[in-house]
Amino acid sequence: MELLRSVTHSYITRSSQSLNIARSRLFQTDRSPVNMATRLMNKLPIQENQLGKVLSNITATLRILNMQPAKKSSTFKARLLQFTAFYMLFQSIMIMFLGWHHWNFASRVAAMENLTYSFGFFSISTDLFLMSSRTSELITMIHSKYYLFGVKIDNNEDVYRNKKQLVENMEKSCLDGVLLIEKVIKCVYLGYMTLPVVSITFYLAKLSKIEDLRLPFIIFIPYIYPITLTFSSIQQYLLSTFITTVYVLYSAILTISVFKIMMLSVNNVLIEMELFRLNFDDLNLYFDYNGMEETSNVRILRENIEGKDCEEESDLKKLMTHVTKHHQIIFRKVKILNSGLRFRLLYFNAFSCLQICLSIFSFMKGEATLKIKHGLVILGMIFNSFFFCDLGQKLQDEGEKIRLDLFYGSKWVGCPNWLIKMLFVMMLQSNNLPKIGLYNVFTLNRNNLRV
């Protein structure tokens, strides 16, 4: 009998010890949403994509031109390039006064277009040269990682994976847009060069004389590039064409780099805003997880208020801390975006309006070669303007969606007071819709395109 008692006691003791060990292991496994999201993010590294390659190409191009990093903008090469831009603008103004009475209609159109083009070229060069620090901030923002966090709960939707997939899809769409806008800009600059191509073709086919050869711009270079745009030999014309080609090629490189940075930086903020809107899915999953057998999220929150489930309330505070940090990151990025694109919006609007008006006039009044050239320029400029104005409109629309999600998509009823205050502060801040503007004079949206 004593032996049976001792065996039974030993068995019960070992069973209780095993049960305690199992319980301790169970409770050591942290099932909180925040920590589960951390483990999930460690298991799911963000995959490399083509965005880094595109940005590396842009940075490499600006480094070759000594316009990045910001400290290189004070080198001799950078100053020489900026002086070239200043000379092109200055000479285009001077020849307007000196040669206007010597020119016919086509030459006067070329002089006016030369002034418009040199203004755009000088503006882009000045932007990259004098405001290189702002360009560097935009590049750093594009390089920065997105604010990703999520909740992983069994038998529920994985928000982090959705965020990761959203980033991949939007980056792919952005890269497609970058390639498209690059082709459009190349089309615009090829439009400028159709005039010398057609002129040389007609001359070689003996359909025109040496005096009829045309160039899109007037660049004053003594003994090489005549101010009257009348060439004495084909060699002189070919040399002037080569100088014009280098000028156009250099302008195209700067323009493509600037517009790519604009598009990538705006898209970076758009992705952050879309990710922020998914935070409300995080909150819903949190309530669903903690409510497993509960049917009312309000009742769960009231239990939290009463202190019955402090651990879940602590997790909710951690989750809301991420949400508020993400909200502040978005507004900081919008501030960087406005600082870097404000001046660009000014000369983008000015150059686009001048060039489109001049091209429409030349298309209606000019000869066949001018119609071909300005037809391509008009199509490219209009598409380019529409594309970027629509991009600014998307930024405003996303800001409006965030404001509506904070007001209508949040669970205000029955929430703890601290949660209501956090949502209220974010909602007030979101009333100031994010936008790209120039001191309320210009705003990058569809109204800007219409004006």
Image (cartoon, rainbow, N blue to C red):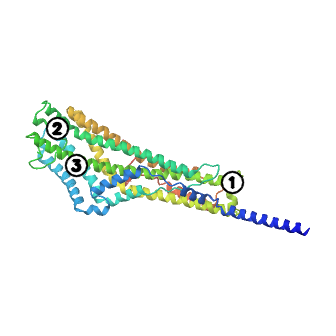
Answer with left or right where residue 4 lies relative to residue 97: right
Cα distance in 3D space between marks 2 and 1: 77 Å
Q: Which residue is mark 1?
A: 291
Q: Which residue ends up furthest to the front in the rendered image?
A: 3
Callout 2: 10 Å neighbours few (<14), some, many (20+)? some
Q: Which residue is mark 2?
A: 106
Answer with left or right where residue 7 lies relative to residue 232: right
Snapshot quadrant of residue 439: bottom left
Tell me the quadrant of the picture where the N terminus can be found. Answer: bottom right
Residue drawn 22% across the image and 56% down it: 81
1 vs 3, front mark: 1
Amino acid carrying label 1: it is Gly
Answer with left or right where residue 49 lies relative to residue 294: left
Which element is circle 1 on?
A: loop
Which element is circle 2 on?
A: helix
Which element is circle 3 on?
A: helix
Q: Which residue is mark 3?
A: 118
2 vs 1, front mark: 1
Cα distance in 3D space between marks 1 and 3: 66 Å
> Vertical placement of 309 versus 265: above or below?
below
Residue 22 percent location from the top left of the image: 72, 62
